[in-house]
Amino acid sequence: MSKAGAPDKLVVNGKRLDGRKFDEMRELTIKTDVIPNADGSAQVDLGGTRAVAAVYGPREVLPRHLAEADKAYLRVVYSMASFSTPDRARPGPSRRSVEISKVIKDALAPAIFLERYPKTSIDVYVEIINANAGTRTAAIIAATVALADAGIEMRDLVSSIAAGKADGELLLDLFEPEDNFGEADMPFAMMPRTKEITLLQMDGELTKEEIATLIQMNMKACEKIYEAQKKALKEKFETEKDLASQETEGEVKNENH
Amino acid sequence: MRTIKPYLSALLAKQTREDGRGVFDYRPIEIEINPIARANGSAKVRIGASEVLVGVKMDVDTPFPDTPNEGVLIANAELNPLASADFESGPPGPDAIELARVVDRGIRESHAIDFEKLCIIPKEKVWVVFIDIYPMNDDGNLFDAASLAAMIALKHAVLPKYDEKEDKVLYKELTKEKLPMKAAPLLTTFGKISGSLFVDPTKREEKALDARLSIATLENGQISAMQKGGSGTFTQKEISELLVLAAEKSKELRKLLK
C-alpha cells in the first residue's frame, strides 16, 4: 500500500470502511425502460456505481462487411462518461475501455441465441455515469437486462459481480478504496441456471484456494443478482400487461356504447 | 473455419491434436536472449511456429501523481500485418490491446519489477519501462509467447545512462545496472473445444475454440492474473483443474527463464 492517499486500514474490527460485512454486496437497484429510443434499456446502481445500457437491434449491420451469414454480429461498447471518475476521464475509447468492451462481449455472447438473427447486428452500448469500482460487472448486469428488455432470445440472463482481497481479507463487491488499495480483484460473470462461467478476470496475488473461495462468493452473489434482474424484468412486463389489459377493457367499453 | 471444429474436437476426445501433441503438451519452445542491439533488453520466443519479439526500452519521465515514488510500466503490442493475413494496419485493435494488457497485468500485479527502485527524484523523475510486443509470426498462443519473451527481456535489460543535469537519457551509454526484478509471472493459456481442455492453442485451434483461459503464475505458486476469452464458458470444476495445470505447466516454462 505505497500508493498516495491510501487509508491506513481497509478492514477495521471485522468490518469494511463502508460498514459492510465481508460477504455483503452493496445495494443493487435495476430499472428497465430508461432510454425510450432504444429497443431495450436498463439502469443499474450498484452502490455508487451507475451503468446505463441501451440495446439497438437486431438491425442492419453497419459497416456492412461485418455482417455474418450464420449469426448476428454482437457489438458491445463500454464507455465511461468524462464526469464519472474523480479526475475528468478523457471522452472516447481508451485502451482500458476497448479491452473491457471485448470481455463484456465474451461474457454476454454465450447467453444470446445469435444464430437466430443472421445477417443482423445487435448493438449494446453501456455508459458508466458514475464510477465507484465494479463498473464492468454493473455494465454486464445492465446489458443483460437491456437485451432481455429488447426481446432478444436468450439462453439465460448473465449475472455479474467482483470479489477480491484487501487487508488480507476476502471481500465481496469491492468499492473504490478496496479496489484501488487492495491486493486483488476478480470480476466474474455466469449464467446462473447452468452455473456456466462467462467472465473471469483476476489481477493481484492469490493462492489457488483463495481463488476457489472468491469464485464461490461470486457465484452465491450472482444468484441474488439473478433474482433482482428477473424481478426488474417481470415488473416491467407486468406493468405493460396491466396497461394493455386496461386498453382492451377500454375498447370493450367503447364497443358497448 | 467452423468446419474444422468437429475434426479438432474428435482429435481432442482421443487426447491428441493435429500436430500429434498430447492435450497438455506445449509445442517446442525456443528462446533467444537480447537479439536486438538497440533495445535495453530484448527476447525472441518461438512456440512452434509462433514467434514473438519483445523489446524493452527505458526512458525518464514524470511519475503518475498517485505513485510519486514509483517507476512506470507501459506495455504495448503491435499486431503487424507482416505476421499474419488476419492482421491489419492501423491503430491497435481489441486483440492487440488485450494481449498487451494481460501481459502488463501479470507483471504489474505481481510487483515483478521493484518500481520504487526506479524512482530518481520523487514526484519529478522516474524510469519508465516500455515493453513492446511484436509478434513476427502468429500461429496461436501469442499470450504465452509474449509473456515469456517479456520476462526474459526484462531480466536481461540494463539501464542506459541518465544525465541528471541535462535531463537526458544517454541511450548509447549503457550502464551495468539491471532492472530490479522481484518476481517472474508467466502466462499459461488453455483452450476449450466442445468440452475438451488443452494447453497452448495453435492458430487453427484458436479459430475453433469456444473459450480460452490465461493464467499468470509466480514462482511460489501464487496466481497474479487471469483472463477468460472467447464466446464460450467454463465450469467451476474446469477452472480448478486449469489452476492446477497452470502451476505444473508454468514450472516447465520457468526452466527457460534462466
Image (cartoon, coloured by chain):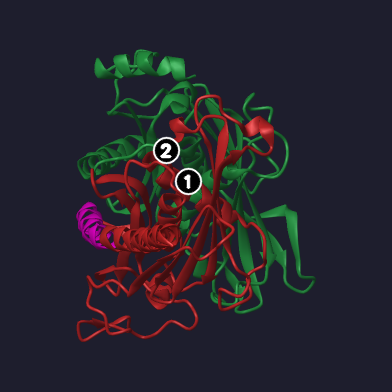
Chain colours: A red, B green
Q: Main secondary structure of the magenta part?
A: helix
Mark 2, other Cα within 10 Å: few <14 / some 14–19 / many ≥20: many
Q: Give the left or right position of residue B143, taking residue B56 as reference.
A: left
Can I make out residue B231 in this image? yes
**Residue at horizontal 31 percent and vertical 49 percent from the top:** A190
x and y percent of residue B206 in the render? 45, 28
- Chain identifier of the residue bearing label 1 in the image: A
Q: Amino acid at mark 2?
A: Ser
The reply to the same-chain question for discs 2 and 1 is no
Q: Quadrant of residue A109?
A: top left
Q: Amino acid at mark 1?
A: Lys
Q: Which residues are magenta?
A: A208-225
Name the mark on residue A105. 1
x and y percent of residue B154 in the render? 53, 49
Q: Is residue A83 above or below residue B46?
A: below
Q: Is residue A220 magenta?
A: yes
Name the mark on residue B231. 2
Are circles 2 and 1 on residues that touch, CB within 8 Å?
A: yes
Q: Give the left or right position of residue A233, taking residue A90 as reference.
A: left
The N terminus of chain A: image quadrant: bottom left
Taking depth in this image into account, of B212 and B125 the one nearest to the observer is: B212
Distance (Cα) linking label 2 and label 1 = 8 Å
